[in-house]
Amino acid sequence: MNDIRLALVELKRKDWTRFRDVRAMVGPEHIVSSEYVPDAVIGLLGSQSADEAEKFYWQLENHVVVQGQTFEAAEHLVPVLVAALKAEMEQFVRSALLELLFQIVAYGPSQYEIELGNADLTARCRSSAREGVWTFYQLYLNGSAGDSEAAFEILKIIETDTERLEAFRLAKTEQN
């Protein structure tokens, strides 16, 4: 497995049994557990094929974020995904990580989370993703075409310095 230690340390720092996902809304006792997240992340990072990566991607995308609605576990997953982007990995894994990050930061909290007082969940996810801003800029300038575009879409959402974003957009245009 590639050097994913940054992501693994971040993953292990959390007690995933404490964080809500989509099942909290529909569970018979309002399940509060994302205990499957570490296995799904490790599986995604170690995927040997695009099909395998997709399988693990959907174990996360359909639970911590569902149809543009985020749940509590998403906030804790963001730093793990950002840390994972620092590792060398297969293209299909990196693309899945970027897509998952985009899904988390692009939309809003579920109504369920809002009712629980988590209306600022998306803002916290974006703030956490912003800690990896230079990783996103690096991918934007030097990543594959798909990764570059995905990184830029994330940057358009999380970057608070619009002048810097424009400067990098111009640099990318000049580079091409």
Image (spheres, rainbow, N blue to C red):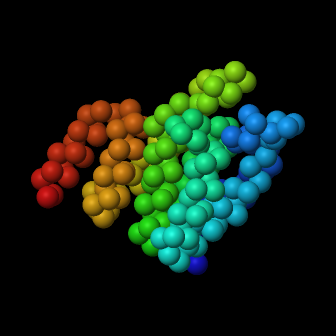
Question: Would you place residue 127 above or below residue 92 in this image?
Answer: above
Quadrant for the C terminus, please: bottom left
Q: Quadrant of residue 37?
A: bottom right
At 53% from the left and 67% from the top, the residue drawn is 53
Q: Quadrant of residue 169?
A: top left
Q: Nearer the viewer, residue 174 or 33?
A: 33
At 63% from the left and 68% from the top, the residue drawn is 43
Q: Nearer the viewer, residue 11 or 115?
A: 115
Going by the image, does 28 lie left or right of 175? Answer: right
Is there any visible trace of residue 71 in the rendered image?
yes
At 67% from the left and 28% from the top, the residue drawn is 113
Question: Would you place residue 22 above or below residue 148 in this image?
Answer: above
Q: From the top left corner, tell me how far across and down residue 55 is, in percent.
A: 58, 64
Going by the image, does 85 lie left or right of 18? Answer: left
| Residue at the farthest right position | 29
Is there any visible trace of residue 6 in the rendered image?
no
Q: From the top left corner, tell me how far across and down residue 92 is, in percent.
A: 44, 67
Q: From the top left corner, tell me how far across and down residue 7 is, in percent.
A: 60, 61
Q: From the top left corner, tell me how far across and down residue 127 is, in percent.
A: 52, 36
Quadrant for the N terminus, please: bottom right
At 27% from the left and 61% from the top, the residue drawn is 145
Going by the image, does 153 lie left or right of 101? Answer: left
